[in-house]
Image (cartoon, rainbow, N blue to C red):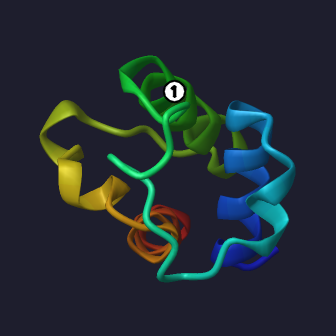
Amino acid sequence: MDALTLTRHILQTNLQLDAVSSFQRDTALLGAIPEFNSLTITSILASIEDETGCEIYDDEISGEIFESVGSLADFIEAKMS
């Protein structure tokens, strides 16, 4: 599974929004989707760890990761490498 598909899957699981399947790389997340809050971010990080088998450290996390679907997909791709 490529990083963008995995990102959409993780977002769908955590946001429970039908529109996630149509999200593009430039779809804004943080500040653009009311359901996207700190609790959601925590759940998304846990899902990334579960799906990729990686560990995410506190110093890796920044708001920039959650700006868009593309920035989150890039982070996930880096964790998959």
In the picture provided, is 1 more to the left or to the right than 47?
right
Kindly identify the residue that appears in the image at 54 percent across and 82 percent down. Answer: 25
As drawn, is 10 to the left or to the right of 25? right
Rendered residue at 55%/66% (across/down): 80
Residue 63 located left or right of residue 1: left
Q: Which residue is more in the foreground, 57 or 35?
A: 35
Classed neighbour count for the residue bearing mark 1: other residues with Cα under 10 Å, few (<14), some (14–19), many (≥20): some
For mark 1, give the secondary structure. Answer: helix
- Three-letter amino acid code of the residue under disc 1: Thr
Q: Name the quadrant of the N terminus.
A: bottom right
Residue located beneath label 1 in the image: 40
Position of residue 35 relative to residue 68, above or below, is above
Could you tell me which residue is drawn at 65 percent across and 61 percent down?
7
**On screen, residue 1 above or below 34:** below
User: Going by the picture, which residue comes out furthest to the left?
Assistant: 59
Q: How many marks?
A: 1
Where residue 24 sits, quadrant-wise, is bottom right
Residue 52 image point, x, y percent? 64, 51
Viewer-proximal residue among 19 and 58: 19
> Residue 31, position in %: x, y?
33, 46
Q: Position of residue 6 (x, y in %)?
A: 73, 63
Horizontal side of 7 relative to 1 (left or right) equals left
In the rendered image, the residue lying farthest to the top is 39
The image shows residue 4 at horizontal and vertical percentages of 66, 76
Toward the viewer: 54 or 62?
62
- The quarter of the displayed image where residue 29 is located: bottom left
Question: Could you tell me which residue is drawn at 50 percent across and 63 percent down?
Answer: 76
Q: Which of 47 and 39 is in front in this view?
A: 39
50 over 38 or under it: above or below: below
